[in-house]
Image: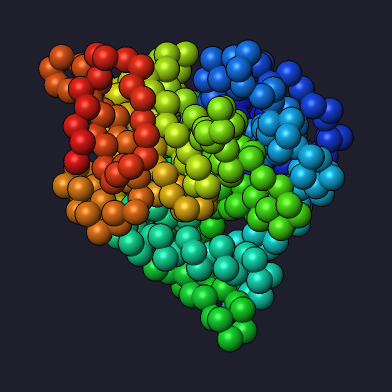
Amino acid sequence: MNDRTTPDRRQFLTGTNPDIPSPVDPCEPGLESMIGPAELRSADSAPLMTYSINAMGCQFQVISTSKGQRGLVPSIHDGFELILQLEQQLTTYDSNSELERLNQCGALRPTSVSRNLFELLGSAIALSETTNGAFDITAAPLSRLWNFHQRAGRMPDTDSIEEVVRQVGFRNLRLDPQGQTVAFEIEHLRIDLGGIGKGYALDELTQLFVERGGADFVIHGGQSSIVARGHRDETNGELTPWRIGISHPLLPAKRLATIALHNEALGTSGSGRQSFIHNGRRYGHIIDPRSGWPADHRLSVTVIASTAATADAMATALFVLGDEELERWSDKNSGTGILALKQADPTGQLVADVFNFGTRNIDWLDDSVTICNR
């Protein structure tokens, strides 16, 4: 089992409910990997306030300007309580969670679930349909087979891969909107919401803040799932957006670019930090649910979408898709911004395929990257 010192964006953990921390220094090193240190420390920018809590195997942070925090502070406690409640509902590490009760009973009989879980499962299935199964909330047994759930990969035999592939598949889920029930059509099916649950929690937190008058803030879970609302600052009467840093997929301390984000969400998936070598070949932890084998088309994918749940799920799905599949999907979904990073053969030079950015602003900080605007 992972612990909170080595967070995994695809898995939820159990644990005690920590007290809500006081505001912390917004210039702490971890934050710099998401939002540029120049912005945080510029004398011309408004100071930032940051509130943090550990949940879902990572650190959630709410970041706001001193002006914007006035609408947020009364809601911080309730917002963090909401995150902890969602963790308890969606975790697969507690047999008493709602999701685990569904996993235990779904193959035996149609099982009633709460409205929000039913809607989340429906959204996940819809995203699976749009990518022909590249995103699949039943695929966790494949990660366990490859031992990536322990953050230490191992090479399984082909027969085992084929056997587990037969035990997964979102098309084996049956959702009945009349009774608000879920049923599994095969015996060993299990649901794990690690690829979408964190983004969903950010969306729910954002909705709570906005309904209570919050504005001009960024919230993130583990820095790979981010929502931005409002603006970072106002200089000489001009509003400036939040700028989100994009790191090198193999060298996380190296910043490649910044992306302006305004009333949108961003999700990133990559295999650069979890992989192993077998017979001279690298295997990353993001597995194609359709084949049972790790995807190796690229190093990372960043997606910009209207919601964090969509951005999270599609970052994983589009990482799995091959180049032609990715291009076809982007053509059909022109409102979704995509930044896909890979290494060119045989030079190893980093290549950035950029889809559907339109008027979104991206500033490249590394001129060695080959940029292909699609």
Residue at image position (49%, 29%) is 243
Q: Position of residue 318 (x, y in %)?
A: 32, 45
**Left or right: residue 22 compared with residue 370:** right
Q: Quadrant of residue 89?
A: bottom right
Q: Residue at 71% across / 47% down in the picture? A: 214
- Quadrant of the image for the C terminus? top left
Percent across and percent down for residue 40 are 61, 19
Q: Nearer the viewer, residue 324 or 265?
A: 265
Q: Quadrant of the N terminus?
A: top right
* Vertical relation: 285 (above or below) 190: above
Residue at 39% in and 68% down: 171
User: Number of labelled discs?
Assistant: 0
- Is any part of residue 30 visible from this angle? no
User: With respect to residue 351, does 179 lie above or below?
Assistant: below
State how the image is colored.
Answer: rainbow
In front of the other: 230 or 159 = 230
Which of the 4 image quadrants contains residue 26? top right
- Could you tell me residue 260's position as x and y percent? 45, 34
Question: Residue 366 sits in which quadrant?
Answer: top left
Which residue sits furthest front? Answer: 236
How far from the left and from the top, in percent, is residue 62? 69, 36
Who is closer to the viewer here, 86 or 75? 75
Q: Residue furthest left?
A: 346
Residue at image position (67%, 45%) is: 215
Please indicate, yes or no, whether residue 342 appears anywhere in the rendered image.
yes
